[in-house]
Structures are given as structure tokens and as C-alpha cells.
Image: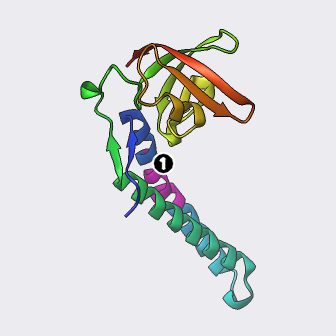
Amino acid sequence: MGTVSYYTAEGLQKLKDELAELKTKGRAEVARQLAEARDKGDLSENAEYDAAKDAQGHLELKIAKLEEVVGNARLIDDSNLDMSKALILSKVKIKNLNNGMVMDYCLVSEEEANLAAGKISVKSPIGKGLLGKSVGDVAEITIPAGKIKFEILEISR
């Protein structure tokens, strides 16, 4: 039994698309490589056949893992999320009390994190530090560079 992870509808759709791609195009490509290698004759000394069999094994493993992730994925219903606290899918405006900079982040699952897009993982040090905090709270977060205090200015969806 794998770990349950929470996803936005968009994030879950991305996973399902990747899975479908692996099952169709991925498997078709591996089958083509195997057939090509088989056509070259003696399989006992056929490095291409071995490589294709390896690739097939890796692909099936990846498919199995992704199926488990999708199977354990839960959609986040943001209609009933508590707006007073920073939770997954919260948009959080924070002020770095060390340098006065104000930043906006959206807290997302690890798989959906994308710093350039302002999406930080709830498992990252900052994400963990913000979870459960309310507006006006100060989160003291230890990062490799030291400790930073962030004041929560605003929480929205």
C-alpha cells in the first residue's frame, strides 16, 4: 500500500496523461525495439535484444509505480478547506523579516512544486514551516543558510 498524496485536478490529470503515454507510446516503442532486435537473429549474443528487454523492464516498473501513485492520489477539494490556516493549495503572502522582502507562494504537493511558478512543496523547509500557520503568525524556518523568520500576511485560495 503506497502513500496517499493529494493533488490538484490539474496535477492529477498530468500524472494520468503520463501514465497513458507510457502505456501506449512507451510500450509500442519497446515492442518495436524488441521486434527489431529479434529480426537480427541469434538472441543469445544479441546485445540489442538484451538492451530492449532491459528497457522493457524499466518501463513496466515505471508504469507500475505511476499506477500506484495514481491509485493512491486523492483530489484536493478546495471548497471545504479551512481558509484561516496555510494548508496545501493555499496561496500565502509572506514577508521575510530578515530582509523585508514580500513573496507569494502556493503550497502544493511535492510532485507539483515549481519554484519558478511560485509553487513550493509542503515538504520543503519553507512549506513545512508555513503549514498550519495563520495570518499574523511568524514562522521561524531553518534553511541551509540559517534561520529566517517569515510573517504570514495573507492566505487565500
Percent across and percent down for residue 98 are 68, 15
Question: Could you tell me what secondary structure mostly forms the magenta stretch?
Answer: helix
Left or right: 134 as drawn, with respect to 146: left
Decide whether residue 25 is among the magenta residues: yes
In this view, the residue in front, 111 or 62, is 111
Left or right: 9 as drawn, with respect to 151: left
**Residue sitting at x 57%, y 62%:** 29
Which region shows up in magenta?
Answer: 17-26
Q: Dividing the image into 4 quarters, which one contains the C terminus?
A: top left
**Colour mode?**
rainbow
Decide whether residue 91 is among the magenta residues: no
Q: Which residue is mark 1?
A: 18
**Residue sitting at x 28%, y 32%:** 77
Percent across and percent down for residue 25 are 51, 55
How many discs mark residues in the rendered view? 1
Left or right: 49 as drawn, with respect to 62: right
Q: Is residue 2 above or below residue 118?
A: below
Q: Give residue 104's quadrant in the image.
A: top right
Q: Is residue 116 above or below residue 121?
A: above
**Residue sitting at x 53%, y 31%:** 129
Percent across and percent down for residue 48 are 71, 75
Q: Secondary structure at mark 1?
A: helix
In the displayed image of the protein, which residue is found farthest to the left? 80
Q: Give residue 115's quadrant in the image.
A: top right
Q: Residues within 10 Å of mark 1 (few under 14, many from 20)?
A: few
Q: Is residue 30 above or below residue 127?
A: below
**Residue sitting at x 47%, y 61%:** 65
Percent across and percent down for residue 142 are 65, 33
Looking at the rendered structure, the kind of residue marked 1 is Glu
Q: Dividing the image into 4 quarters, which one contains the N terminus?
A: bottom left
